[in-house]
Each structure stands twice: as structure tokens, then as C-alpha cells.
Amino acid sequence: MLQFDLLATDGHARRGRLTLNHGVVQTPIFMPVGTYGTVKGVTPRSLQEMGAQIILGNTFHLWMRPGLDVLAQFGGLHRFERWERPILTDSGGFQVWSLGEMRKISEEGVKFASPVNGDKLFLTPEVSMQIQTILDSDIVMQFDECTPYETKGHITTEAEARVSMELSLRWARRCQAEFARLANPNALFGIVQGGMFEHLRDESLAALVAMDFPGYAVGGVSVGEPKDEMLRIMAHTPHRLPAHKPRYLMGVGTPEDLVEGVAQGVDMFDCVMPTRNARNGHLFTRYGDLKIRNARHRSDQRPLDETCTCYACRGETAADGSVSGGFSRAYLHHLERCGEMLAPMLATIHNLHYYLNLMQEVRDALDAGRFAAFREQFRRDRAHGV
């Protein structure tokens, strides 16, 4: 089941409500990435407390481990990982792309050796749909070929991008047929491909819209291309998708990317950046990015972000409304220098809270009809420096 209600617009920017089998998602939304059935470093309860409405699971990796036999015993991913809100699963296409020389693509699908135990495996559009049906994810992504920006030292040509895009379209039709055969009660999204070529993006988009998917994604960005190329495709594609259906920009990105993506008509985002960067001591704040390992934070008594209400910055709020106080930059710097596991845990809580709160502020601005002003203030704040 999927229902999308468009509640407000401001230029291309949209405020919406997405109703799925496991709950309602307010858009625009950022979706934390839970590759192996967990968002690294945080508990499901923490995710709920910081406002996560929907998270991702990774079809490829969950197929490898723990395996479909285990997941089937639990009736899918929700009960297995104790997350009762919506889940989106990717198709495995990006992971296959990242295998490089370990895989062989054909019309039928992709042959590759398991990176876990070396087993010979074959992933097809039909198998991807079968795996995601067992996972019972609320949003299922079609199996596609993620068109690379560069291969073996040369930038993908228009002809190569066309071949890849057209293969993804044929796979989209097969995904749709298998999804229907399985009577999957959830929602299947098509993925717009076409590399860095606008007219190929338009062809892919038109063909997918003709197939009438419940929602659409823009794929093949954040695959090694220069930032200005990504922004060009982001500015061209999302607002051309049907207005009455949700739009998802895959694998993007920085806080600036999210706000600009909203301005171009995107409803849904995901990226490993807030969690991955947290594990490397890279923190996002309202006033720019902060590298907590730098010596200048050694005795700094301030929190990471004085405007932030996450556990790392503010601490806990008791039943009587009193606040216990958060952790200083000096303490987080100390934890990082000592290699304590609490450092990436607190950093992850902070970064995810920042991303989710940013999307809440975007939704509030759209509700109030002041998104353009918010966008300008956001740019000024982020350029301010910490």
C-alpha cells in the first residue's frame, strides 16, 4: 500500500505525507541507512526518539547474511530488527556495481562471487523482487544497473550510458511483472537512470512513468561524478516526475545537497554520510562542519552545537523537565583520541539528529510558506563556521 498526499508547494519544493503499510512518513524526509538490519551505533529506540520515520535496509547484504531462511522465520525485516515503522530496501543494484571486476552483467542478470564466502551467485530482477518480498519492506526498489560515471579510467560515454539505461528499463518491466506475480502488498519504485545526459534521463523518466510505478527514484548520482555534474542532474530531473507521486534521490548527500534537493522537488533522501562521517570524527552542525579530532577542541567546554537538542549536545530531559546537560567538545575529543567506542556512538546520535531535525525545519518552513527564506538563512548559517 502507498498513498501520497501533496500538502503544499513552494516553487518546485513540496510538503507531503506518505502513507505506507507500517506507518505514515512526513516529507521531505531523510532516511538513515541500516545496511545489515541496523543503523550503525544507535538503537531502534534512539532512532525513534530523534524522529526517524523510515530507515533503509540493504537487499544484497541481508541476502548474504543472515540469509533468507532466517528472515523468513521472522516474517521479514521489521520483527527481526525490532523496527515497527516503515522500511525501504534497495534492490542490490548499487552493491553489484561496487563489486567491479567480481561481477559479470548480462541481459538476464548479474553473476558474481559472494564477498562473504565466495559462493557463485546470480542476482536477477526476479530474484531481487523475491528477496524484498521476504524482507517485507514497505518500499521496494526495482533492480537496475547503476550507471558508473567512470570505468577503467574513462568517463562513461553517451552510448554506454544509453545501453545501461535501456537495460535498466527492461529490468524494470521484469521487476514489475514479478512483483505482481508475488502479490507483494507493498510499493515498488522505478529508478530513473541515464548518467550525466539530460536527454537520456528524460527518456528513462518517460518510459518509467508510462509503466505507472507508485513512486520514482533518481539513481546513478553520487557515483564518483564531480559535484557540479550531480547538481546539474538534480536540478534537471526530479521536478519532471509526476507531481502526485513521491520522488526519491538515492544516496545524497550533504546537508546542502538535501536543502537544494528539496528546492528541486525531491521528497526522500538517504545517505551513509551522517553515520560514516561520525565514525571518523566529522560532525555536522548548524554553523558548519566540525572535526572533533583537531587539537583545538582539547579543552573546549562547549557542546558540539549550542542550538542542538540531541543527547550528545543537551543530555537527557527528566520527567520534571529538567535537563542533565550534554557532553563537551573536550570530552568527545578525549574519547576520540583514546579510541573509546562511545565517541562514534555520540557522534552518530548527533549527526543523525542534525539531519532529521534539518528535515523537520524544512517541513516547518514549507508549512509556513517561507522555504525560500529558510534556504537563504541555512546557507548563511552553514557558511558561518564553528
Image: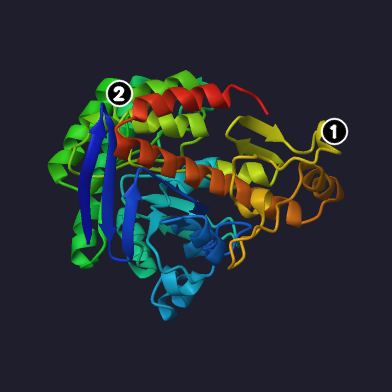
Pinpoint residue 212: horizontal percent, then vertical percent.
15, 46
Pinpoint residue 54: horizontal percent, then vertical percent.
41, 56
Q: Which quarter of the image is occupied by the N terminus?
A: bottom left
Amino acid type assigned to the residue bearing label 1 in the image? Ala
Rendered image quadrant of residue 107: top left
Disc 2 is placed on an element classified as helix
| Of the image marks 2 and 1, the number of the one nearer the N terminus | 2
Report if residue 225 is visible in the image. no
Q: Is residue 127 left or right of residue 305?
A: left
**Relative to 140, residue 207 above or below:** above
Report if residue 87 is visible in the image. yes
Disc 1 is placed on an element classified as helix
Query: Alpha-carbon neighbours of circle 2 within 10 Å: few (<14), some, or many (≥20)?
Result: some
Pinpoint residue 100: horizontal percent, then vertical percent.
53, 40
In front here: 187 or 372? 372
Amino acid type assigned to the residue bearing label 2 in the image? His
Q: Is residue 98 left or right of residue 24?
A: right
**Relative to 136, residue 329 above or below:** above
Distance CA(mark 2)–CA(mark 1)? 42 Å
Q: Which quarter of the image is occupied by the C terminus?
A: top right
**Relative to 87, residue 313 above or below:** above
Q: Is residue 174 left or right of residue 262?
A: left
The residue that disc 2 covers is: 236
Point 39% across, 67% down: residue: 135
The residue that disc 1 covers is: 295
